[in-house]
Each structure stands twice: as C-alpha cells, then as structure tokens.
Image: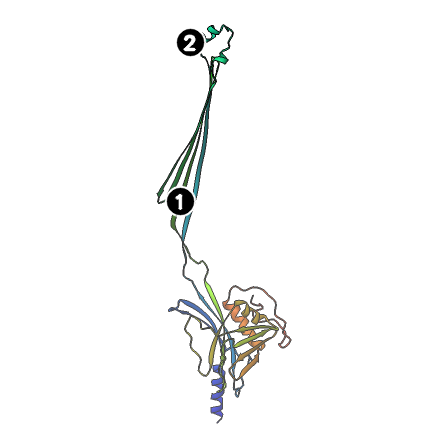
Amino acid sequence: MNRIFLLCCAAVFAGCATGNHSRYDEFEKVKVDQMVGNNVHGSVTVFEKTIVCLNAMRETRWPGPITNQVVTYATNYVVSSVTNLTVNTSANQQVASATNAVALPPTALVAAAVAGETNQSAANLNAPNNSTASGETISTTSNQSEAASPNQKVTSGTVQTVRMLNNQITVTTNNFSITSGTNQIITSETNCVITTFTNQSVFPVTNLTVVSPDQPQADYYLLTEITPPPEFALQPGESLVLLIDGTRHAFAPAAPRSAWTTRRGFVTTFYKVPADVLVEVANADEVKLRIKGSNVTIERQLSRSCRQNLREFLLDYFGPDRAISQPINTHSRTGPSPHGQQPT
C-alpha cells in the first residue's frame, strides 16, 4: 500500500514539475520558447483535485517581405471655352448743295418789253417749282456656322446690318435752282466665334514597394494547464481574467502558429497577450487569476514561486538582462532573487 501511495505521489509531482524549453517548428518556421508546469500555488498536494498552471510562451519568426502595390487611375478632364466677339460699325455721310442760275424763257422777255416794264423781276415771271425726294433702305445679313471634332467645337456667327438714307431737296425760284442732297450709309457688323476645347486623358499609375523586415516578429502567449473537474467546460469569449495589482486584463483563447501537445491529464489553453502583460505579471506584487467556465469558475492567486519562475523565464529567453530591483511582496520571504534582476 505504501508503495502504491509513493508511486501516486511521484506521478503527481512529476506531472507538475516546472520546466522551460525551446524548440524550432520547421513546418511553420517558428522558434518557440515555452514554460511548462508552473503551478500558481507553488506546491502540489497529493489530494488536490484541480491543479492550475500559468505558463508563458513566445513564438519568434521572420515575417515575409511586405509588398505594397497600388494602381491609381487618374483622369484629367479639362473644358476650355474661348469667345471672340468683334463689333464693327462704320458710317458714311455725304451732304451736297448745288446752286444753278436759270435763264428766262423768250416769251417772258417779249411780254416784258411790250408792257414797257423793264424792271420786272424774274420772280414774277417764273412760278415756283419745288421738289423733295427722300428714301431709306435697310438690309440685314446673318451667317451661322458650327464645326465639331472629338475634342474641339467651334461655333461662329456673323450679323451685318446696312442702313442707307437718301434725302434730296430742290428749290427753284426766279432764275435760281437750289438742290440739296444728303446720302448716309451706316454699316454695322458683328462677328462672334466660340471655340470649346475638351482634353480628357486616363492613365494608370502603379506604385510597387517591397520592404524586407530587418527584425524578427514575436507573438506572446499565456497558457493555462488545468486538471478540470468533470463538469468544467471553458466559457466562450474572454475566459481568462487577470488582476495585476488591481488592474484587470481579460483575454480570449487564441491558437498559436506552432504545433503543441497537451500533457496527459491536463487541458491546455493558449491566450495571446501583449509582451507588457507578461512583464507586469512577473513584476507585480499581487496577481489574481480567474478561469471562467460555463458553469464553474476557477480562481487562484499566484504564489511567489510562480511569479519567480515566470521572471526567470523572461530573463533567460526574452532579451538581455538589465539590473533592476526586487519587487516588494509582503506575502513572500525577504531577500534578493536568485537572478538579482527583474524583467522589463
């Protein structure tokens, strides 16, 4: 009986032993640094039903080149209108006056001699003969033309108006004949030319940029290993909640790129977290953990040894060592840490 009890104890403690390891997944080309068996209580009793382990993991890979290809179609559509308007007006006016002396007819002279009146005026001998002639002529000429091409349209028009005035007056008295004539010509011409230019061009512009990364890309995870009770089922959504010195952080399950295997008797769940969260957990004074199930909730408080294991893992795998102070923890023993450092 004692032998069976010792074997059971050895199996339990072996299953909860803390270990760190690194491996390379050649299928996904990912380097994996991972913790295993970091019990949040720091120690495991033989009859403990639910064991909760909180581990850290990092996947490091070289991302592929980033190609940025942008094709832009630029359209240049320009409409230009040019209008030429010319108005020409010309006026010609001519005024002419003519005075002609008219001789007396012979019958008038004879009658004057018989009567013995030699001082008879011509005005008494000739009856007045006055005449007036006037006229106005207006002519209008209009021309309209339009020419079109694929990118040009020309519209032209000409309007011409000619106005002619004729006025002539003739006055005949005694032996004088006075003729006055007026000729007026007014020409008005309007030329209108409208030219419309349309330029449309469509051309593609392609920008191709290839950027090769110079730094590896890392994804950080917290993974829980639990021996759940029979009625436990993980709740969908944010099922892991951490209280780090009173600050709440919630995370949903996320599968890593690399392949992984669950330890016998445990249920492993991965949560993708920022790297700062891992550092905060390792350096915190108090960290509380809650795993939400559909009908059961598991709550734990991380022990000093659990946080110390996490700190040592970060110092060994997550970059160069930096000299920092030991975090204050009222629940743990005093004294420097084995490494004397704190992850940042």
Q: How many marks?
A: 2
Residue 148 lies in what quarter of the image? top left
Confirm whether residue 181 shows in the render. no
Judging by the rendered image, the residue that carries numbered circle 1 is 198
Closer to us: 340 or 116: 116
Q: CA distance from mark 2 to mark 1?
A: 86 Å
**Which color scheme does this rendered protein use?**
rainbow
Give neighbour class at mark 2: few <14, some 14-19, many 20+ (Cα, 10 Å): few
**Label at residue 106:** 2
- The spot of residue 34 in percent (x, y) is 47, 72
Is the C terminus in the top left, top right, bottom left or bottom right quadrant?
Answer: bottom right
Vertical comparison of 145 with 337: above or below: above
- Report whether 324 appears left or right of 260: right
Residue drawn at (39%, 68%) of the image: 28
Residue drawn at (58%, 70%) of the image: 283
Q: Earlier in the sequence, mark 2 or mark 1?
A: 2
Query: Which residue type does callout 2 highlight?
Result: Pro
